Amino acid sequence: MVEEINPFENAQKQLDIAAGKMKLEPSVHAMLREPMRILEVSFPVRMDNGETKIFKGFRVQYNDACGPTKGGIRFHPDETIDTVKALAAWMTWKCAVVDIPYGGGKGGVICNTKEMSEGELERLSRGYIRAINYFIGPEKDIPAPDVYTTPQIMAWMMDEYSKLKGYNVPGMITGKPIPLGGSLGRGDATARGGMYALKEAAKYLGIDLKKATVAIQGYGNAGQFAARLVTEMFGSKVVAVSDSKGGIYSEKGLDWKAVLEHKKKTESVTGLKGTKEITNEEILELNVDVLIPAALENVITEKNVARIKAKIILELANGPTTPEADKILHKNKIFVIPDFLANAGGVTVSYFEWVQNTYGYYWEEQEVHENLEKKMVKAFKDVLEMAEKYKVDNRTAAYMVSVNRVAEAMKLRGWV
């Protein structure tokens, strides 16, 4: 059972820790604790049965000192303003840690996509864009896909925004299909960026990834690609994976293709022949070299942190570790690659997509991968340097790198 913890309060606590270490000026700290702008909208959608249903949506622009805000749109039945605020804050730090000229934003609509037809989903997507269109734009705030939103949904949103403007605006959103100005290399960018960071961490710790065992909690987009890439790039052995229905374990290692095929057929990784069933809680506590939480927030807490045995935690999920658990992981010398560094590959390639849209010239996939690796390696080294200099854990160090950059931009603009 996942603990009910307010994600925005977590984000604020993490900032407060870094601000204390940095001796951040009170005015800068106060401004960075809260979003600059929040938009809440209600908008109508005609359903297939002829009824009109009213949906509630949000868009948060956390801080735009470094450039236009950037962040995904989530379609989720339990969406809350606090989740959106927390994710917008983390996007601010994520863009700053990889040093791309964006601030952080996030959006969401309270809805259950599993209960909607494709037509209803399209009308919802277009309705949301009509409701927030004056709040976003390629120089102002650039959305992207997130939970239960897809490249097809981005295509509808781009088309709706372009209709409202009267001309094509591909750069108003990223994560689009390739024929509409999407970028090659975007599909696996989150997991691939994480792999580049993992490679650096293993090098630093003297761990041979060829001999490493890996457990992955979550088998959505990031988890699936992580299983494939950690196998293909390094030859590591993935011994356990899980999804919302439970997990599977095999000491001999899992074939990511077989797991994916099984999940497509049965809608879950559970029940794969030749594997042992384990729970989502158990997967976190396995004796593996690398643990990759790639699902929900707040899964590593004070209650289970003492039982975590992995040497490296690569946080592909947003906010999987609570601040209280962080302290214990650091004390236990478990090397954490914090979420907004580990999963920054997605927003970095989104930035590359926006750049390509802006000047109308598109890169080969190899070029995308090379530029992503450069960004991730530089960000990892910046964080490690900060951690060693101030003798702090990696998350605090990542915050310090990011907050420094955002604070400097705010000061140069004369805001504080």
Image (cartoon, rainbow, N blue to C red):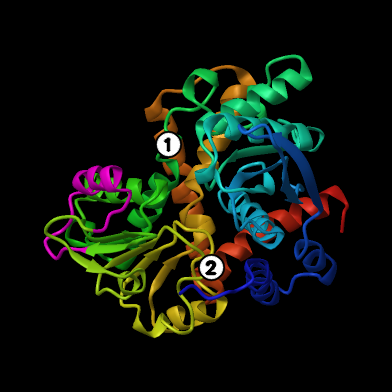
User: Which stretch appears magenta?
Assistant: 249-270
Disc 1 marks which residue? 187
Disc 2 marks which residue? 395
Q: Which is in the foreground here, disc 1 or disc 2?
A: 1
Percent across and percent down for residue 376 are: 46, 48
Secondary structure at numbered mark 2: helix
Residue 331 left/right relative to 280: right
Residue 360 vertical position relative to residue 10 in the rendered view, above or below: above
Residue drawn at (60%, 44%) of the image: 72
Percent across and percent down for residue 373 are: 42, 43
Residue drawn at (62%, 67%) of the image: 7
Percent across and percent down for residue 107 are: 67, 47
Residue 281 left/right relative to 110: left
**Amino acid, disc 2:** Arg
Mark 1 or mark 2: name the one nearer the start of the chain: 1
Residue 136 vertical position relative to residue 386 in the rendered view, above or below: above
Residue 136 left/right relative to 354: right
Residue 366 in sight here: yes
